[in-house]
Image (cartoon, rainbow, N blue to C red):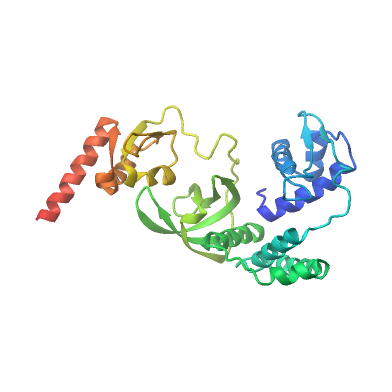
Amino acid sequence: MATNAIDQTRRMLSLVTYLRERPGARVSDVARAFGITEDELIADLDVLPMCGTSFRGGDLLDIDTDGDRIWWHNPDDVAEPLRLAADEATALLVAARAVATLPGLREGDRQALLRATAKLEAAAGEAAGASARLSVTFESEGGVFADVDRAIAERRRLWLRYYSPARDELTEREVDPIRLFAVGHTYVEAWCRLSEARRTFRLDRVAEIRLLDAPADPPPIELRDLSEGLVQPATEDPEVSIEVGPGGRWVAEYYPHDSAEELPDGGLRITLRTPDPASLRRLGLRLGRDGRIVSPQALADSARQAAAQALAAYDD
């Protein structure tokens, strides 16, 4: 079963209490108690040492595992009641108010957050007044994230207008969301009803999103292991080499690649693998003077021919 970000946060908060009461707990027992796989538990344990009672960098949870048992080395250090400094209270209040305005946030979660914010304001005193003069506005990706997270929680289908850089076009599609994850950028893995296949969508490329009344019903599929990165091309996939100038460096941002070597003129030599090299011919046309496909030779020749045909059409 897919887990959304809010559910994972709740689980990790419960995990702290659980581990405090069970020193040296076995990984298998903890995973079974929380209804998750051991790999999912290890992923949580990788995050917990970055958490603590202060975002200044101290008082972090010293939790580790040898693969069999889990050890929390400093439970007493973080057991004292939390005392927020003025700057910490201000930051927390500003963040809480901003999150409460996210579109798509479940109403129950919003009300719980507002109640917690009110209690924090009462405890913060003068710091609460300072925080009221500050505000944060989330960019569009925040709203997309909230809608996707809600769709996963409520098992609802989504309608998307999505920008595909490979085809340089916007497409409309209905998808059944499976999970949210972050690998450099934030993505949603979903079953796409347009292609009838599993697809991964980057949230900052979603131009428009709507929750549908139709229930999400993705077919049973095994979740991919993302520990080695989002894109794991097969060794048999053809390799494509592209050289871009300074104006074409955006290619390394939009296209998953194996390597991006700096060139003397400020450009890049980008190497990537794809099962369909012909799909990159449009990229060669888009680059124009800002880049060229170097190999395979057949793809480079095809891109040049397409460019020549396009120029001839303009001359006509």
Residue 54 place in picture, x, y as percent? 76, 50
Going 44% across and 54% down the picture, which residue do you hit?
194
Decide if residue 248 is on the left or right side of residue 203. left
Quarter holding residue 41:
top right
Percent across and percent down for residue 243 are 31, 36
Q: In this rendering, is residue 248 above or below 294?
A: below
Relative depth, front residue between 55 and 298? 55
Which residue is at 20% across, 45% downward? 307
Residue 37 drawn above or below residue 81? above
Q: x%, y% of residue 35? A: 77, 44
Total marks shown come to 0
Question: Which of 241 and 157 lies nearest the eye of the viewer?
Answer: 241
Image quadrant in which you'd find residue 272: top left
Q: Quadrant of the C terminus?
A: bottom left
Which residue is at the front of the view, 17 or 169?
17
* Residue 139 visible in image: yes
Q: Is residue 215 visible?
A: no
x 74%, y 58%: residue: 88
